[in-house]
Amino acid sequence: MHLKRPQPSLLAMLASGYSPMYACHVTAAQMRTHPIGTGPFKFVEFKQNGVDQAGEERELLEKGLPYLDGIEFTIISSRATAVLAFVAGKVDMTFPTEMTKALISDIKKQDPSAICEIGPINVSTNLIINRETPPFNNIELRKAMALAIDRKSMIDIIYQGQGDVGGTMLPPPEGVWGMPPELLKTIPGYSDINKDREQARAIMTKLGYGPNNPLKIKVSTRNLATYRDPAVVLIDQLKTIYIDAELDPVRSSQWFAKIARNDYSVGLNLTGNGIDDPDQAFYENYGCDSERNYTHYCNKELEALFDKQSVESDVEKRKKMVWDIDKKLQEDVARPILMHARSGTCLKPYVKNMTIMNNSAYNGYRYEDLWMDK
């Protein structure tokens, strides 16, 4: 690989769950139903009758290593049903990072032997606003919406306190590049919620809105509990600044295509990151030409700083550069970060050698070292 410039983060990005290797000759349509890639397992079949199931069997064997002969992923749309299946022993572990604190408490009551772990997953819940569609092309309106967000309250309601306030990057202590709390407090919307909302209402009044003339909008989001629940809380919080919002749930198969083509006004989105590194987070989510830059935020001067921080090998120097960039992104209401989730994984005690990653929800899925003592 020949790079145009040094990029210290390259190896980490190649090693992440966001960088799978797959066969170039296989069509995208075939990859959706019968993927062909690399790793310790090969895909066997995908069933769509009743409960969806995807099966994989062991392909690469390492002498002397305990290993699984195969893995079966049972796709259960209802979280409550998934919990019952785990407690009943129909599955050996929950899908990594899918359990809330409340669900884990329910599991532990029914199965005290279950081993559960809650940790950061490097997935942020964020507000996406279509800045190209009136009235949201007004920066003052977007600022008012950002000022209305009570992040602590949202974390307490949705995750029973198991979450973190932060900017774009994964917050410390697990996050290497996240802004420290004292810097966060200098950003509008991150300090005194009462003062912030007072300022937001003043902006809305100036724009012609009020208790008797609220701004009516739809908040689009993916029709999954992890999206819907915070969207409902967001809608309630927006009422405090004269915005009357209606929930618009979108099927999972349509969600990302919908926001990619800019077919929304206001939305609540979850942004997962492959690793804890600014290169992946900044270029992918805020680059002017990035397909994943759903709000079409574009700041060429700031984008030039993406390059400068990327080549910096001194961690402490790079941190300060990253913090400055992240602070500017929040001040510009590029994609307001509502919270960073901490989610859980539960497994039966006979499942051995499972490591839950805290730098991404998408890493640690190879299961080449996983085995069962049963």
Image (cartoon, rainbow, N blue to C red):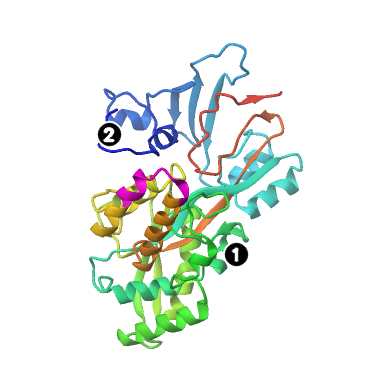
Task: Decide: is 92 above or below 282.
Answer: above
Residue 325 position within the rendered picture, expressed as x and y whole percent measured from the top left: 37, 58
Residue 50 position within the rendered picture, expressed as x and y whole percent measured from the top left: 49, 36
Q: In this view, does 115 lie to the left or right of 366?
A: right
Residue highlighted by disc 2: 3
Mark 2 secondary-structure assignment? loop
- Overall secondary structure of the magenta section: helix
Residue 269 position within the rendered picture, expressed as x and y whole percent measured from the top left: 40, 56
> How many marks are shown on the rendered structure?
2
Query: Does label 1 or label 2 sit earlier along the sequence?
Result: 2
Can residue 59 be seen in this snapshot? Answer: yes
Highlighted magenta segment, given as a residue range: 306-316
Q: Is residue 207 left or right of residue 115?
A: left
- Give, as a three-letter code, the residue at label 2: Leu
Residue highlighted by disc 1: 156
Magenta-span inclusion, residue 310 = yes
> Looking at the rendering, in which quadrant would you find the C terminus?
top right
| Residue at 75%, 39% in the rendered image | 113
Residue 51 position within the rendered picture, expressed as x and y whole percent measured from the top left: 51, 37
Closest to the camera, between mark 1 and mark 2, is 2
